[in-house]
Image (tube, grey):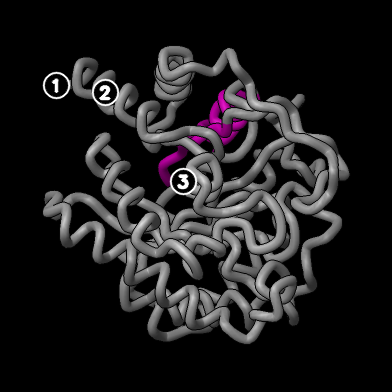
């Protein structure tokens, strides 16, 4: 959602990032959700990746976390209702990293993280069907979300998925350096319906799925980004450019997704840079493959 909104001029790649679209272009958010649904997506994700204090504070809006998270959930629900998709389609409430992506060294402590996740969960609950803790760079970061979910009685009826981001050069490890197998075994105890890998290269995700499939007690899968390896000290506001991988076309994206399936994946999708045309190609491939 965030990168696609930025590509279309509805948000910026600094400051508020994807939350900017909630402030200035909420109709564009709804329209993009519908576009993904039209392409064949059966899970759409709320535009809440940057409705967190660390991003909103940059614009003096840190007190509006609940407002923007609630709005993002309602826009996704509006899109699903207006599109008239089948009852099998679902909305995932995005629960993101609370400081920077890919930076396990910047993960806030549990006593800081859990109250923020609780507020996001509580705000999204009226609109979503499940929760997605995504781009988790360490075991502790994912555990903070699990603890927040456990502590809210209203979240007990919700499924949840946890998705880790991996070392771009060694998909057997999280960006924290922790082993994928250790992360999967630890988080499996928190009863997610799936453990996924996202926002890293397809090669690393394939390796991660292979590791996870050996030990997971739930489903596994992955949704890669369209970036070349990200600098280890990267932050959203610095001047280091993240370079798109021009070789990851819709066709090669489908090829990688097929390899994910062969490695044991049952959840497939796309992260940053994977627009509706990629999802359309994936959906058509899956229809041809299994139906």
Q: Are marks 3 and 2 in contact (CB under 8 Å)?
A: no
CA gap, disc 1 to disc 3?
27 Å
Residue ID at (50%, 70%): 23
Q: Secondary structure at mark 3?
A: loop
Q: Which mark is residue 286?
A: 2
Which quadrant does the C terminus fall into?
Answer: top left
Q: Which mark is residue 140?
A: none
Q: Which residues are magenta?
A: 204-225
Residue that badge 1 annotates? 291
Foreground tag (1 vs 3) = 1
Circles 2 and 1, Cβ within 8 Å, touching? The answer is yes
Q: Residues within 10 Å of mark 2 (few under 14, many from 20)?
A: some
Q: Residue 65: x percent and y percent?
A: 57, 79
Is 175 a magenta residue? Answer: no
Q: Position of residue 94 (x, y in %)?
A: 49, 60
The residue at the point 84 percent across, 49 percent down is 238
**Cβ atoms under marks 1 and 3 closer than 8 Å:** no
Quarter of the image holding residue 172? Answer: top right
């Amino acid at each position: 959602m965030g990168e696609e909104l930025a590509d279309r001029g509805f948000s910026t790649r600094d400051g508020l990032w994807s939350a900017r679209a909630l402030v200035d272009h909420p109709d564009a958010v709804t329209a993009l959700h519908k576009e993904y649904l039209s392409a064949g997506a059966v899970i759409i994700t709320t535009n809440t990746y940057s409705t967190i204090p660390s991003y909103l504070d940059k614009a003096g809006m840190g007190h509006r976390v609940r407002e923007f998270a609630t709005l993002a959930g309602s826009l996704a629900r509006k899109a699903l209702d207006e599109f008239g998709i089948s009852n099998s389609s679902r909305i995932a409430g995005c629960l993101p990293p609370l400081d920077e992506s890919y930076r396990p060294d910047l993960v806030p402590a549990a006593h800081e993280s859990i109250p923020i996740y609780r507020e996001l969960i509580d705000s999204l609950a009226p609109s979503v069907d499940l929760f997605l803790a995504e781009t988790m760079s360490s075991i502790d970061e994912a555990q903070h979300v699990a603890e927040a979910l456990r502590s809210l009685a209203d979240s007990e009826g919700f499924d949840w998925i946890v998705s880790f981001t991996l070392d771009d050069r060694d998909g057997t490890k999280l960006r924290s350096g922790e082993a994928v197998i250790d992360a999967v075994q630890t988080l499996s105890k928190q009863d997610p319906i799936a453990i996924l890998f996202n926002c890293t290269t397809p090669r690393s995700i394939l390796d991660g799925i292979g590791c996870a499939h050996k030990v997971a007690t739930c489903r596994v899968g992955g949704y890669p980004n369209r970036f070349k390896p990200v600098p280890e000290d990267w932050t959203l506001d610095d001047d280091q450019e993240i370079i798109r991988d021009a070789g990851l076309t819709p066709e090669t994206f489908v090829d990688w997704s097929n390899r994910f399936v062969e490695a044991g994946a049952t959840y497939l999708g796309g992260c940053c840079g994977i627009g509706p045309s990629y999802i359309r190609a994936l959906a058509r491939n899956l229809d041809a493959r299994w139906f």
